[in-house]
Amino acid sequence: MNKPSKVPSSDLAARTIAVAKAVAAKYADDVDRRARFPSETFAALSEARLLSAAVPREFGGQGAGMLELGNQCAALAQGCSSSGMVLAMHHIQVACIARHGAHAPYFQKYLRENLAEKQELIASITSENGTFGDTRSSICAVEVDGDTMQLVKDATTVSYGANADAQLVTCRRAADAANSDQVLVLFPKGSYTLEQTGTWDTLGMRGTCSPGAKFSGHGKPEQIVPGSFADSSAQTMVPYSHILWSALWTGIATDALQRAAACVRGAARRKPGSVPPNAAALARAYAELQTMRHNWQACAMEFDAMTAADDAAAREMLDSMNWALKMNQLKIACSEAAPRLCHRALEIIGILGYKNDTPFSVGRHYRDVLSAALMVSNGRIAGKSASMLLVVKEV
Ligand SMILES: Cc1cc2nc3c(=O)[nH]c(=O)nc-3n(C[C@H](O)[C@H](O)[C@H](O)COP(=O)(O)OP(=O)(O)OC[C@H]3O[C@@H](n4cnc5c(N)ncnc54)[C@H](O)[C@@H]3O)c2cc1C
């Protein structure tokens, strides 16, 4: 497992804030309305070399830790939720490759040339028709025959699949492997086809462009990420997903409350010397926003501290039930807090927040964060936590 760099890339968040304000926020409504990929934002991120934030420094990236990546995703989501989610999903895939494949020549070359130099974007295919949202189970299997390898997968949801330069796909290790005996396989552009099987006309997160698709890829066995997906899921995919998603949901709630705060300040200016009646509701909402932000940041700092230390000890900690519970609790707490805060923002602002065409509109934010509880369903996550809580004595 590759350790993250200890050297902070201090200007990462500042450069992302610049893209969020100048580009992501400008196109967010159009991206939402037309359910289109936020191409301007990703062109700007690529231009600023921000797509390689999670690539270790030894391969030409910024080697950012979890806290920095979280701050980056939160900043971008303040401008455009879908952009924040796409960036988070990309970093999750990069982290799986960097932390589990970086000792293999194929992935070293990919990290350096495709991710750092060319600023390519990776999408993820974990969902599959027939596994019902259980990422730790696959029906499809990679077929290795000598020096060649191929895979076919019927996916329910593939975000920005058509806009990505590569797909990282979960599948069974072999045709005779159990459903939970999975591996991750990387397919760079040119080695696969994606045939769209559904539409993506959703309530929110419309810019993630995530319809179902039939995936068919081929290549060489070296494209299989070393080790098992059981390890890369527990040690990387789950912590990166739950922490970075929580960060970006915090970013969305932050922007909604900033709109509420601007509205309250406007009311205060109109009646100098008085405190508007909805200012107290705003104060209570900010208390919850602070809890939410500190929750993901504490988990991110704990992850960075753990992974900066000895590898074997870090793996053991990341594989523990206590850590798995912490990640599940973070995901459930933040995915439930974000819609609550958007609802509070709407109540504080009133009709100007309900309308879609005012500077105080929060409808898009609200619709976007409603995906948080579904994106690996909270019911499924709570079910897994419930089983662990039967055996873990101290949480
Ligand atoms: C914006 C967005 C982007 C996405 N992008 C991608 C992507 O890029 N790639 C990808 O592969 N997938 C993606 N997904 C899919 C996502 O990660 C989930 O796989 C999918 O949303 C789960 O679908 P589901 O709700 O039908 O599944 P389920 O998890 O089966 O949930 C359905 C219902 O069953 C309940 N349920 C299921 N199991 C249990 C249980 N054990 N205990 C209690 N209740 C249970 C749930 O609570 C829920 O009510 C995306 C989803 C969203 C919303």
Image (cartoon, rainbow, N blue to C red):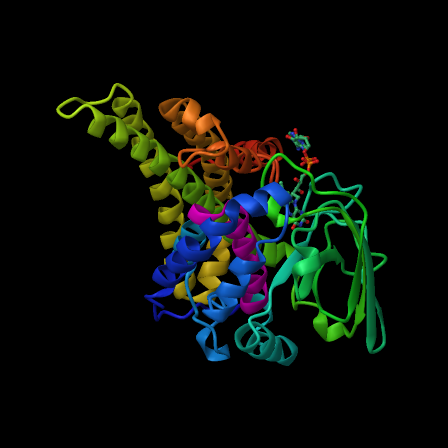
Q: Position of residue 348 (x, y in %)?
A: 36, 24
> Taken as a whole, is the magenta stretch helix, strand or loop?
helix
The reply, left or right, for residue 229 in relation to residue 346 is right
Q: Quadrant of the C terminus?
A: top left
Q: Residue at x 50, y 59 (%)?
A: 315
Q: Position of residue 31 (x, y in %)?
A: 58, 47
Establish if 141 lies above or below 375: below
| Quarter of the view holding residue 12 | bottom left
Establish if 102 lies above or below 326: below
Establish if 57 lies above or below 256: below
**Residues shaded magenta:** 77-99
Q: Residue at x 75, y 56 (%)?
A: 171
Q: How many numbered marks, from 0 up? A: 0
The reply, left or right, for residue 258 in relation to residue 46 is left
Q: Residue at x 40, y 52 (%)?
A: 75
| Quarter of the view holding residue 295 | top left
Q: Is residue 194 magenta?
A: no
Establish if 320 lies above or below 379: below
Q: Position of residue 385 (x, y in %)?
A: 55, 35
Q: Position of residue 79 (x, y in %)?
A: 44, 48
Residue 257 in view here: yes
The reply, left or right, for residue 202 in relation to residue 149 is left
